[in-house]
Image (cartoon, rainbow, N blue to C red):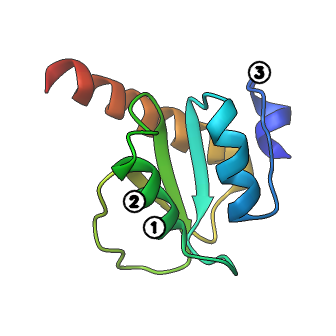
Amino acid sequence: MALCLTTKWRVIVVPSVREARTLLSSLHADVLLVDERMPEESGSELVLSLFGAGALTRTTAILVTAQRDVAPCPGIAGVITKPFNALGLATQIASLVRRRSSDRVGG
């Protein structure tokens, strides 16, 4: 909700990993904000499978988690740790997107 109020981004929320996969098969997302703890599979597993399938070549994937020490995972541009300031979320996401974009250009 805060992202809709503080940015001009179009935010789409899906309730399950299955629906996320379906949506991402037909829609390009600039940013994928995914929770680590989900009932069907972890956010890391989802990102890893999408990354391995080449589905995240132009997408910045960001993991949201309450865990303090998350192992790096291919395809994940950054981690936002819970609890977070909802009104500052857009700034955190934008920073990770900029960093990811500069990594692609420079690297």
Q: Label 1 to label 2, Cα distance in Å?
A: 6 Å
Q: Residue furthest left?
A: 107
Which is more foreground, mark 1 or mark 3?
A: 1
Q: Position of residue 32 (x, y in %)?
A: 58, 44
SS at badge 3: loop
Give the residue displayed 40% in from the left and 47% down from the top: 53
The residue under label 2 is which amino acid type?
Leu
Earlier residue among tags 1 and 3: 3
In this view of the protein, can residue 76 be seen by the observer?
Answer: no
SS at badge 1: helix
Q: Quadrant of the C terminus?
A: top left
Q: Quadrant of residue 82?
A: bottom right
In this view of the protein, can residue 13 be seen by the observer?
Answer: yes
Q: Label 1 to label 3, Cα distance in Å?
A: 27 Å
Q: Which residue is mark 3?
A: 8
The residue under label 1 is which amino acid type?
Ser
Relative side of 100 to 20, left or right: left
Q: Which residue is mark 1?
A: 44
Answer few, some or many: residues within 10 Å of disc 2's Cα (few below 14, many 20 plus, some between 14 and 19). Answer: some
Badges 1 and 3: C-beta atoms under 8 Å apart?
Answer: no
Q: Which residue is mark 2?
A: 48
Answer few, some or many: residues within 10 Å of disc 1's Cα (few below 14, many 20 plus, some between 14 and 19). Answer: many
Q: Which mark is residue 103?
A: none
Badges 1 and 2: C-beta atoms under 8 Å apart?
Answer: yes
Earlier residue among tags 3 and 2: 3
Q: Position of residue 37 (x, y in %)?
A: 61, 78
Which is more foreground, mark 1 or mark 2?
A: 2
For residue 39, above or below residue 90: below
SS at badge 2: helix
Q: Label 3 to label 2, Cα distance in Å?
A: 28 Å
